[in-house]
Amino acid sequence: MKKGVPELLALDRAHVWHPYGPMPGRSDPYLVESARGVRLRLFDGREIVDGMSSWWAAIHGYRHPVLDAALAEQAGRMSHVMFGGLTHQPAIDLASTLVELAPDGLEHVFLCDSGSISVEVAIKMALQAQLARGHPARRRLLTWRGGYHGDTFHPMTVCDPDGGMHSLWTGVLPVQVFAQAPPAEFDPGYAAELEALVERHAGEVAAVIVEPVVQGAGGMRFHHPEYLRVLRRATEANGIFLILDEIATGFGRTGEFFAAEHAGISPDIMCVGKALTGGYLTLAAALCTGEVAAAISAGAGGGLAHGPTFMGNPLACAVANASLGLLADGTWRARVRAIENGLRGGLEPLRDIPGVADVRVLGAIGVVQLDHPVEMAAATAAAVAEGVWLRPFRDLIYTMPPYVADDEDVSRIVAGIAAAVAAG
């Protein structure tokens, strides 16, 4: 029996714990009844443009007929089968396609349940491979400040140790090696310091892990691709693995298929997730080189110490294959460029508003940074009043819309951001 809005919100308040908040929440969430294209339909009948792609994942929008059909067809065959000792075509096809699309040298694919878990797996890969290569002291990780890699325990250790949401775990989590956050423009002095830091800690560091070009939930900061080339040279020179976390940046978000392409480098290990299934189901992957896989396979235990129950879920793999198929003709590039142009032209005038510290745009990412924390409830309500769904955090009001957002949608998103800036 269909429940009314007051009853549903009362039950939500009583029982549902939402992300990054207390129980019960500080305010009622917006109740979504359905979604299609780039629009969310609320229970009260309002339709709002989703400026967030459901946390950056729904790149093709909602109810896409190709993705719907792939999901239904696979459900008619089998929804799941264990991956230990068994395999199936959706997973084989997905792994093969990812290897074709990935930077050169990434030959092997470990399928994971979520982005954070793919980072866990990548870290395990690096630690096990270093141990197998005879470097048991290499047990730490090196990264730079301002990053975000997930909410499970080891990924939290490489999130920003001070400004991040994980600072309350200080004293519980292992302490990693941190460089200062990378500048937006190329600074030879910073590059030299970065290289020296890697060399200085080479005896204890198993891998360097960074988000390439765009730091996501740690602050929506952009940095010069040359820093990735610096890290690639420094890690190769010191026998350290380079892990690129492409969970937020992969599959076209920055204007290149993978952000590593801005720098023209290949990592030893790469994490993907979020948009992998077009936002339909949770699925991620950790890809690695043959060298990493060979070291792990020859080491103690003879294999990677990980194996989730829903690994390689056929439903998720089938819809991921369909999503990658939608990207295959490259038309997404023109749409991302159009979104970039619309966001840049629409958001740049906000730079002159009092309280705005910075405006930055790259690919289908638009960010307005304030000089103070956002009044989140007020900013969100103002955006919704303009017909736009945004999810500000800290001092940031930003958008990462679906690639299928047209010029009118982007204009509405810009208006929503402007309203959120004024209210927040």
Image (tube, rainbow, N blue to C red):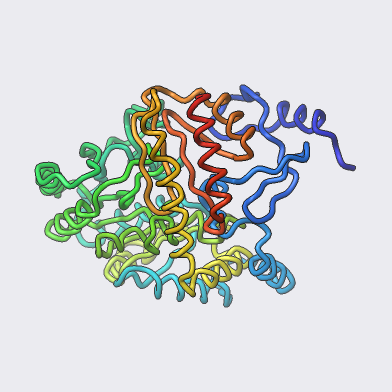
Q: Is residue 303 above or below residue 279?
A: below
Q: Is residue 286 left or right of residue 193?
A: right
Regarding residue 35, the answer to whether it shows in the image is: yes
Where is residue 318 drawn, in percent x and y?
60, 69
Q: Is residue 104 left or right of residue 370?
A: left
Instruction: Residue at 71% x, 74% y: name it.
Output: 77
Where is residue 147 drawn, in percent x and y?
34, 41
Q: Is residue 377 above or below residue 264?
A: above
Instruction: Residue at 29% x, 60% y: name it.
Output: 262
Where is residue 324 drawn, in percent x and y?
51, 69
Nearer to the camera, 97 or 95: 97
Regarding residue 200, the answer to whether it shows in the image is: no
Q: Is residue 191 above or below residue 369?
A: below
Nearer to the camera, 330 or 25: 330
Nearer to the camera, 39 or 315: 39
Q: Is residue 20 left or right of residue 98?
A: right
For this orientation, the residue located farthest to the right is 1
Instruction: Residue at 36% x, 42% y: name it.
Output: 360
Q: Is residue 378 above or below residue 231?
A: above
Instruction: Residue at 90% x, 42% y: name it.
Output: 1
Where is residue 87 drawn, in percent x and y?
56, 74
Residue 86 lies in what quarter of the image? bottom right
Residue 238 lies in what quarter of the image? bottom left
Q: How many marks?
A: 0
Nearer to the camera, 36 or 268: 36
